[in-house]
Image (cartoon, coloured by chain):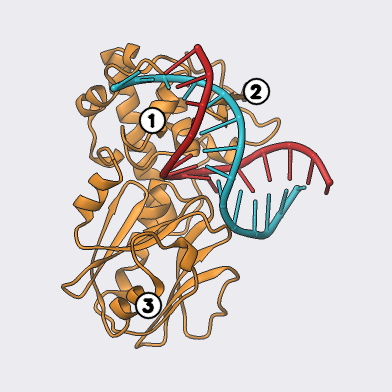
Chain colours: A orange, B red, C cyan
Amino acid sequence: MPELPDVESYRRGLAPALHRRIAGVDVRASRMLEDTDADVLHDALEGGAFEATQRHGKYLFARIDDGPWLVLHFGMTGRLDHLAPDAPEPPHTRLRLELEDGTRIVGVWKRRLGRTDLTRDPAAFARAHDLGPDALALDAEGLGVALQDRRGGIKAALMDQSVVAGIGNVYSDEILFHGGIRPDAVAADVGAARLDALSEAGRRVLETAVERLASDRPLPDDLLLPHRRPAGSCPRCGGGLATWQLSERTCWLCPACQH
DNA sequence: CTCCATGTTTAGAA
DNA sequence: CTTCTAAACATGGA
């Protein structure tokens, strides 16, 4: 489920691999490369070591020695695993990095929607891909600036990576639910008090999800996510949840709690 | 077989 | 210029 919390948990999962030499590289996803090719990527990684990591929105960056950064985007079905020496390789592994200690970092994409790339500068990469500020770097004031003049629906604005980076279909529903705001509210019309509530809800939801996912624990039951299924009920009021079709996506909400 | 899915990009219509 | 809609991409799962 790669939105900001998932990608941040993958980033944290790389910590034990930092400073360990990458002894073997297998790039099997040549169609997922954009600004590089499999040979260049292979040569950049083999013999190097990850020395630093960053995340911007749904993109993960890992610096190879003092050189370029590996860029990973997980699309709808990707994930990053750190495998023990005796662990079997998951199906749909499309990038495999063997470390000198016998563990493997594997990029697993069930569908080949996503990107594997190299960049000299994550900030320049983010600009080139038109990414807005990272969702965890925004306060209520910054959120207001991002949403001003946006006449479309607030859910569409939150999912627009050039407005706020990191939020997708699932977490936009989650944040709007906790902010008590309808997904079809006009973004620019959300007033200051409700922006505060929305910003606070966003921070709480994202930070909670990061902590839970990074430690491999389930999400708290007062989130909407565990309840988004047919006949699911609102964890706050117990009423029935609704689904709408918005921005070509299925949107889950509680019609009683969100106005 | 049909429909749906956590994302992004692009084209075309308002 | 902004906003919305649809399609394409790729592929498994219900």
Q: Which chain hosts label 3?
A: A
User: Between disc 3 and disc 2, whose residue precedes?
Assistant: 3
- The residue type indicated by label 2 comes to Gly
Q: Where is residue A169? Give x, y as percent.
A: 49, 36
Q: Could you give the CA–CA distance between mark 3 and mark 2, rounded to whole angstroms?
A: 53 Å
Give the foreground label among 3 and 2: 3
User: Between disc 2 and disc 1, whose residue precedes?
Assistant: 1
Badge 3 local density, few (<14 within 10 Å), some, or many (20+)? few
| Residue at (51% x, 51% y) in the render | A218
Badge 1 local density, few (<14 within 10 Å), some, or many (20+)? many
Q: Which chain hosts label 1?
A: A
Residue marked by disc 1: A158
Look at the numbered disc 1 and give the secondary structure of its residue: helix
- Asked if A199 appears above or below A64 in the picture, the reply is above
- The residue type indicated by label 3 comes to Asp
Left or right side of A119 for A230:
right
| Residue at (33% x, 22% y) in the render | A197
Give the foreground label among 1 and 3: 3
Q: Could you give the CA–CA distance between mark 1 and mark 3, rounded to whole angstroms?
A: 37 Å
Look at the numbered disc 3 and give the secondary structure of its residue: helix
- Asked if A232 appears above or below A106 in the picture, the reply is above
Res A39 label: 3
Q: Where is residue A58? Give x, y as percent.
A: 37, 49
- Asked if A26 appears above or below B11 in the picture, the reply is below
Q: Could you give the CA–CA distance between mark 2 and mark 1, rounded to whole angstroms?
A: 24 Å
Foreground of the two, A256 or A146: A146
Q: Where is residue A32? Give x, y as percent.
A: 46, 61
Q: Where is residue A29? Give x, y as percent.
A: 49, 68
Q: Are marks 2 and 1 on the same chain?
A: yes
Residue marked by disc 2: A240
Q: Which chain hosts label 2?
A: A
